[in-house]
Structure formats: C-alpha cells, structure tokens
Image (cartoon, grey):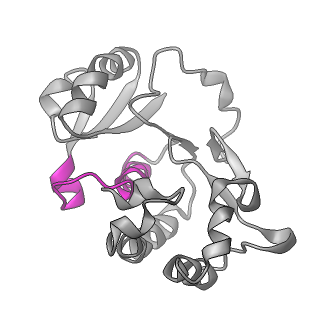
Amino acid sequence: MLFATVCYGPIFTKRYSNQVNKVGKENTVYVLTDRPELFPDCITRDYSSFTGYSYFTYYSKILFLFALLEETKQRVNYVDADFLKITFNKELIVDDTTLFTSIAVPYNKTLLHRLDYKKEQYKHWYNFLDEVGLETKGDKVFTYVTEAFWSFPYLDNISIIADRARELQTRIESIFTKDPIHWSGSPLKRYAST
C-alpha cells in the first residue's frame, strides 16, 4: 500500500519520524519534509523544493497527494504524520474508484457554519465559496472533508483535478494569509497561521 505524509518543522519531524519510518519498513511511504535525513525508510521529497516555501502550508498536503497520483498512477493514501501508524486498517480501502476520508461532514454540521453570522467580516471566504459553486445554505450544502486522511484513487482525469487544485492554491492562500489575526477567533484559524 502506498502512503504519503507531510512532516515539517523541528518539533513535528522529531516527534513523528520514528513512527513514520516504522510504516516505511512495511509499506511504501513518501514523505514531504524539510528533514529528509530523518526518514531513511521512506522516499522523501524536499519540502521547499516542492512547495517553493520555507514555511508550512496546509495546501502542501493536497498538492503532494496529487503530484504522487500523477507520478505513480495508483491509489495514494495521504495520512497526517501524527496519525500514520503500522496499525492503519488497510481493509478500509475496498475499491479502486472511491475517495475515502476520515470524516466527511455537511457544511452546516461543522463549526464553519458559525461564520455565517459574520458573513461581512469573512466576505472573501464566502465570495470564494460562491465562485466555485459551494453552497452554504439549504438542501445542497457542500461536504467538508478533513485534510488529515484521504485515500485517493488514480483516475483518468487526475491531471485535470490536480491542475484545478494548483489553480485554486493562490486564491485560497491569499484569503487566509492576508490578515491572519482576522481569522484568530474562527474554526479556520489554523489555515491562517502558516
């Protein structure tokens, strides 16, 4: 089974490199990291070379996942380094076409919907959701998928999906990094603190 993870920064790499290497001894594990020497049992990619950044961004997870899908042309299981263990239940993956995730929650059942009461304050976020056709009201609210675990199949149109993700990156990151303090009281604050 092919796994991928991002392990960045001195605290995170020191804390999780041993458990990621244990998985790497039994499975193929790709690690996007700023400390490749800590992952001798894995296939590493240099974080700053891949992202062009010398700081962590949550968006690197999805871009790394899509880059590996395009490169390997097989299912990639992205698991955050703090969750990647040898006890991962491989029986969760039952077919070659379905996206699996740890949690998929309708928008109105997440903490995100609390921003609705401050729509003007977070207008850039809501404008973006409108532009990409994600509903936040009514019967057709979008589903929020957590970024800690994705098992993504290789699909014939994966390059189109990956291109769309890369296209949206600048816009999404600009929304959150423009004014990080602005997001401090919101459920999205971690995306602004990178």
Vertical order, 172 against 41 (above or below): below
Q: Quadrant of residue 20?
A: top left
At 34% from the left edge and 66% from the top edge, which residue is drawn? Answer: 180
Residue 127, horizontal then vertical, whole percent: 56, 84
Q: Is residue 13 left or right of residue 96?
A: left
Vertical order, 60 against 128 (above or below): above
Q: Is residue 141 left or right of residue 23?
A: right
At 28% from the left edge and 23% from the top edge, which residue is drawn? Answer: 15
Q: Work out which residue is located at the far left of the displayed protein and give it.
A: 37
Query: Quick one: 44 or 113, which is closer to the camera?
Result: 113
Q: Quadrant of residue 9?
A: top left
| Magenta residue check for 184 | no
Residue 60, horizontal then vertical, whole percent: 34, 54
Q: Quadrant of residue 151?
A: top right
Query: Quick one: 35 or 9, which is closer to the camera?
Result: 9
Q: Which residues are magenta?
A: 47-72
Query: Quick one: 161 or 14, which is closer to the camera?
Result: 14
Q: Quadrant of the C terminus?
A: bottom left
Vertical order, 31 against 141 (above or below): above
At 87% from the left edge and 69% from the top edge, which residue is drawn? Answer: 139
- Magenta stretch secondary structure, dominant: helix
Residue 90, horizontal then vertical, whole percent: 60, 23
How many badges with numbers are in the image?
Answer: 0
Q: Is residue 150 left or right of residue 165?
A: right
Residue 135, horizontal then vertical, whole percent: 72, 74
At 72% from the left edge and 51% from the top edge, which residue is drawn? Answer: 105
Vertical order, 12 against 69 (above or below): above
| Magenta residue check for 51 | yes
